[in-house]
Image: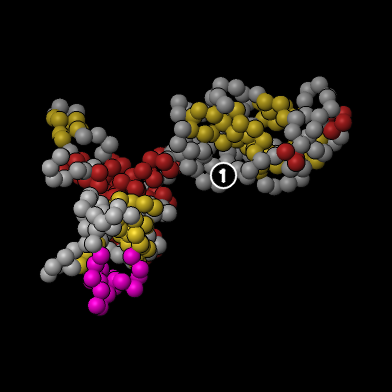
Amino acid sequence: MIVVVTPPASEPLTVADVTVHLRLDASNQELAPGAITAALAATPVAGNVDNGAHRYLCTFATADGETEAGEISTAVTVADKTVNGQISLTAIPLGGANVTSRKLYRTAAGGSVYLLLAAIANNTATTYTDNIADSSLGAQAPTTNTTLDPLLTRFITTARQQAEQSLKRYLVTQTLDAYFKDFPRGHERRFYLPPLSSITSITYTDIDGVTQTLAASQYVVDSISRPARIEEAYGVTWPSTRDQMNAVKIRFVAGYGAAADVPACIKDWMLFQINTMWETRTQFTISTGRAALTQIPNQYIDSIMDAERVTGRV
């Protein structure tokens, strides 16, 4: 039995890789909003907006992400904030059905970087009064549209797990625990592990029930063979273990390395799988011309769950 302890910190493919492969453009995402109308408060009132010229923009937020920055408003200049230091925002754009909130961004006085002013937690309000000093502005407005990112990220992970299940090897570096009932004895005195980068530790439960750590000098690792092998060092015999399940645990690091080290053929296979998941999001398709019902092959759909499938007797 092998259990993932630390999953890969990154995937073999990025969302940008998948976006290019699927030829996705703005029409596949929530479109960025148009411009806000900004003006000094109609009735002069002192406020906190710093003296100088300010511009505004808006973004749409969905359950999946946020659009890139929308169109920029015309500049509004505060000459003396002690006289008229508040700015009225109107015609704040409304988004589509998937938009759950909107974010307003503003430049500091005379600046060109758009920083978070406020979040409107609905998709109905179209007005807002800005009474915020430059020093209270927040994070910079996004430059990319991430409203599709969670879906594509999930597809990438699914495709990577399918590849690992099919190849019986791990792609990007990750840490795993392999459990065995005992150390191998007799003619077969070697452990065989999936693609191996290094051994972190070998621990075992001795005959007294105490967890022990095997010194690195007690074993040798052959990481060149496929699969990799571990065997006793010269003149060493595996220690005795208690007769129980999972008495021996080998923690090891596996994978090709970083995402850039994963072979191109595997990445291409993943892209084909992701393309299928993107284009075919249902188990059945209906041909309206002939009213025919077509089922996607079960071997493809069912294989998605192979990484979690329990085999053998239950």
> Which residue is painted at 24% across and 77% down in the image?
235
Residue farthest bottom in this picture: 234
Q: What x and y, as percent, mark residue 114?
A: 66, 43
In the picture provided, is 152 more to the left or to the right than 65? Answer: left
- Quarter occupied by residue 278: top left
Disc 1, SS: loop
> Which residue is painted at 34% across and 59% down in the image?
212
Q: What x and y, as percent, mark residue 13?
A: 37, 54
In the picture provided, is 222 more to the left or to the right than 186? Answer: right
> Which residue is painted at 38% across and 40% down in the image?
151
Residue denoted by label 1: 142
**Observer-nearest of 17 and 90:** 17
Q: What x and y, as percent, mark residue 63?
A: 46, 32
Is residue 107 visible to the viewer in this orientation of the structure?
A: yes
- Quarter occupied by residue 265: bottom left
- Quarter occupied by residue 277: top left
Residue 238 against residue 149 in the figure, above or below: below
Q: What x and y, as percent, mark residue 79?
A: 85, 36
Q: Amino acid at mark 1?
A: Pro
Indicate yes or no whether the magenta region holds residue 95: no
**Tag count:** 1
Residue farthest front in this picture: 208
**Dot 1, crowdedness within 10 Å: few (<14), some or many (≥20)?**
some
> Which stretch is magenta?
214-239
> Which residue is painted at 25% across and 74% down in the image?
236
Is residue 304 visible to the viewer in this orientation of the structure?
A: no
**Observer-nearest of 300 and 295:** 300
Q: Quadrant of the image for the C terminus?
A: top left
